[in-house]
Image: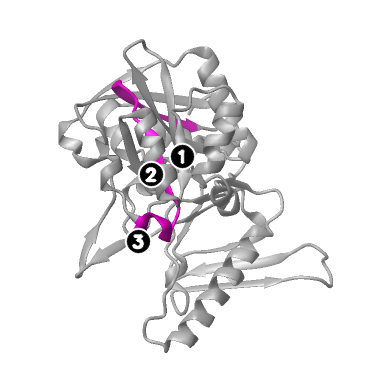
Amino acid sequence: MTEERPVLVATETNDVTADMVISHLNQWGVPVIRFNPADIGWDLTITARFGGRPTTMAGRLRTRSRSVDLEQLGAVYWRRPVWPMFEHLAEADARLAAAQVRYGIGGTLYALPGCLWVNHPLRNAAADYKPTQLALAHRLGLTVPPTLVTNDSDEARQFIREHREVIHKTLRWTPYQRDGISLTSWASPVRAEELDDTVRVTPHLFQARVDKVADVRVLIVGRRVFAVRIDSDLLDWRKDYTALKYSVVDLPNRLEKTLLTYLDHFGLASGSFDLAVDRDGEHHWLELNPNGQWGWLEEKTGLEMAAAFADLLVRGEPHVLAR
């Protein structure tokens, strides 16, 4: 058996989901180098040479316990890395230092030739804009709930009056604290009389509410599709995981192919889709999370999601899981 090429895993210190994938790689004897950009300094060094001879890039990444020649890497699993904030520095110095890390580490890794990314950060970023997602979903023939993005309060009120039951969503999840307490935003019902001119401060996303009976989370890893039905009485099932029931389902063939095409459009190797199922069994598009969580779904359903990720990182072809 030929020696497997090393896999680089970029993620935060405590990442149980990454641990699940690394466990399979370890069992298969695949060299794994795990790092977090926030460790830059004594715990993480990166070196790269460009130009001269040889003409290809040569580089090395080293942590306290592992090191790897970057040109030998077979794949990069870009999970949940944390970038350094340099809070001990003055604000201007911290901003400068943080930029150097992002463009130094990021730029060096982005230059890797012939390396599989799951997923490439720049492709993740391109796929993370909800208006772009909605437009593509509609073009591909998916059922998209009527949606309005606007900072015009009059337009928003008119949209709510037209569709009656409307929810509000953030355009992107962002860490947020108030009085030192971390808060998050859920999909929530909104009425026209609740809106005032503060809507004009920033664009908002308003969407006609789907009369759903369940949600479906679809994880795609390469060409493998895992679909889990999530039953609850919640508008936004993320609010209470204890209230959820899970069941493994098969997607209609056409829908499955369309979601694969969706990922291909953005050049993504993986992605997590959220769909709503109405009373007639029709699937309604909600969103794509290019780097969504899935570890708890494997625990609840027994689906071999972590093994699929490991297989993709090693083979680049997830069609057959035979190890």
Q: Outermost residue toward the bottom?
A: 90
Residue 299, image x and y in percent? Answer: 27, 33
Percent across and percent down for residue 251 are 44, 16
**Nearer to me, 37 or 211:** 211
Where 94 falls versus 270 (above or below)?
A: below
Q: Which mark is residue 5?
A: none
Please give the range of residues in magenta.
197-220
The verdict on residue 251 being magenta is no
Q: Earlier in the sequence, mark 2 or mark 3?
A: 3
- Would you name the residue on which mark 3 appears? 13
The residue under the point 57% across, 20% down is 257
Q: Secondary structure at mark 2?
A: helix
Measure the C-alpha gap from mark 1 to mark 3.
Answer: 38 Å
Rendered image: mark on residue 148: 1
- For marks 1 and 2 on the same chain, the one whose residue lies earlier in the sequence: 2
**Dot 1 amino acid type:** Leu
Look at the image and tell me whether residue 21 can be seen. Answer: no
Residue 125 at least partly seen: yes
Amino acid on which disc 3 is placed: Thr
Query: Colour scheme in the image?
Result: one colour
Q: Residue at x 38, y 44 (%)?
A: 23
